Image (cartoon, coloured by chain):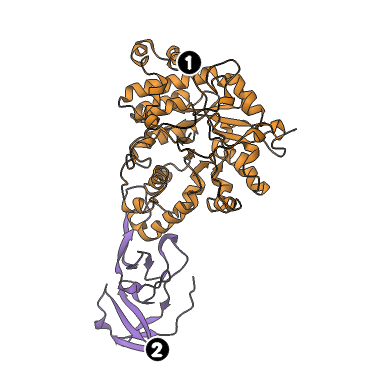
Chain colours: A orange, B purple
Amino acid sequence: MSNAPSKSRSSAAGVSEGPGFQKEFRAVDCDVHPMLPDGTRSLLPYIAENWRERLASRDMSRAKSAGSLYTTPNPTNRVDATPPSGGPPASDPAFVVKDLLDRFNLAGTILLPYQAGGLSGWADGREAAVWAEAFNRYFIDTWLPVDGRYRLAVIVAPHDPGKAVAEIRRCASIPGVGAVWLPMRNILLGNSYHDPIYAAATEAGLPIVLHTGGATFSAPRAVGVASTFAENYGSLAAGGLAINNLSSLIFEGTFESFPTLKVVFIELGWTWVGPAMWRMDRSWKSLRVQVPWVKRPPSDYVIEHCRFTTEPVDEPQPSEQLLQVAMMAHGERTLLFSTDYPHWDGDVPSLVFGGFPADLRRRIFYENAVDTFGDRIPAPTAVGA
Amino acid sequence: MKHIIGNVDEFPLGVGRIVEVAGREIGVYHLAEGFFAVLNICPHMHAPVCRGQLGGTYLPSKPYEMEYGLRGRVLRCPWHGWEFDVVTGQSLFGIDKRRLKSFAVDVVDGQVVLEAAPIAAAS
């Protein structure tokens, strides 16, 4: 979710669309947030006994304390997503099947347990690694068996790349694991500090996913300092850490070092992607000499390696401009549909991109996800086929 | 049309010099590879490109391997830093399709002779 208030919008019309949505193909939802039904108590069985005493005091409000810098006029979770069985929204995997996957006839979802994301702001990397592993074990155990369309982004603690690599390798071959969630901290993502994590992820054939939240709520520049002037110049002043990190990945040569790496920017916006590519290309033309390992125009790397989820979709006026912005971002390759279920600012699949050409809709709603997550996404099944 | 622009010893090796021929400013370069001449207008934003630095550049490489090459033949525009190979006139490493306008230049009997009509931008 984003903490920024926004005008309220009734989603009742979209939700009532029912399973008739998407006649021509089934959509993949690349940002869904499952919750623990009972906070830390739900996790304790998945934490080694000698760590339980220490982590028991980590309640969920503190787990996301980095995001608690602000009060919010809207509750994080949609009240209508509360399961009939009780508990928080999206804490009952069977109800999420009914309320989201079946309602919109989705082909698959990427699950990111949002409560875990705050660990990147913790000081103790050992605690963070234990916490990450507990979340992964919980959702692998309790969610993945419920529906074959669930795919979990396993979270790793970025504090210690060695521990992150071990967790990636532990999870890589578990059916239903679909991505590696690398929470952003205070080191730009192109920095070679992260290379062991990228090596392990590419070896496992898992994309890296980034999500807003965690340490990303920290002060501007807390993401670190660019290594080169080219990198700094290549990042737009507005738009913040996603642009900084995109520029870092490009100008540090990460995609030259890891030619099969995919990085998915989740809930970090996308209408800035076109202008960011123009700016980075301009930087490269003038300053390539400083980053000679950047062998192609930066936009080439973005289109090949980087993906951006769509929620929350910006709403320009006139609305026709949205298509132009999507084309600037090369949305036919780079955009992945997402709902952000069960969060308050989510997009309803039947209500977004209605004015887009059918080919582009198919790319955004389905085919780009398959290109990104590969056989980690359930096999394509045409509706009615 | 051919123009004699000076004696060969007025063009030291490795140094560029801007001459005015038929109303055009043209940079003339005496390199190890021979004599080369390019119009003093950058195809990007029309900067006086020949007032930029002549040298080498970092070649495409793996991250931080730092391979330096093309010594003495890379002209770096003083405005936006676009790099051109003086020998071919082309932008380096595919940064852009636009290229420097090249002129034929030769040494005849110790004199540097420049063909003022622009040669076709052959690839």
Q: Chain of mark 1?
A: A
**Can you tell which quarter of the image residue A182 is in?**
top left
Q: Which residue is mark 2?
A: B2
Q: Residue at x 45, y 63 (%)?
A: B96
**Number of marks:** 2
Estimate the spatial distance between the alpha carbons at disc 2 and disc 1, rounded to whole Å. Answer: 88 Å
Q: Residues within 10 Å of mark 2 (few under 14, many from 20)?
A: few
Q: Chain of mark 2?
A: B
The answer to whether residue A157 of the structure is visible from this angle is no
Callout 1: SS: loop
Q: Residue at x 42, y 25 (%)?
A: A167
**Can you tell which quarter of the image residue B109 is in?**
bottom left
* Image coordinates for residue A313, horizontal then vertical, percent: 55, 42
Q: Which mark is residue A38?
A: 1
Q: Which mark is residue A180?
A: none
Disc 1 marks a residue whose amino acid type is Asp
Q: Residue at x 45, y 61 (%)?
A: B94
* Image coordinates for residue B95, horizontal then vertical, percent: 43, 61
Disc 2 marks a residue whose amino acid type is Lys
In the rendered view, does A161 fall on the left or right side of A346? left
**Can you tell which quarter of the image residue A245 is in?**
top left
Of the 4 image quadrants, the one containing the C terminus of chain A is: top right
The answer to whether residue B23 of the structure is visible from this angle is yes
Callout 2: SS: strand
Q: Nearer the viewer, mark 2 or mark 1?
A: 1
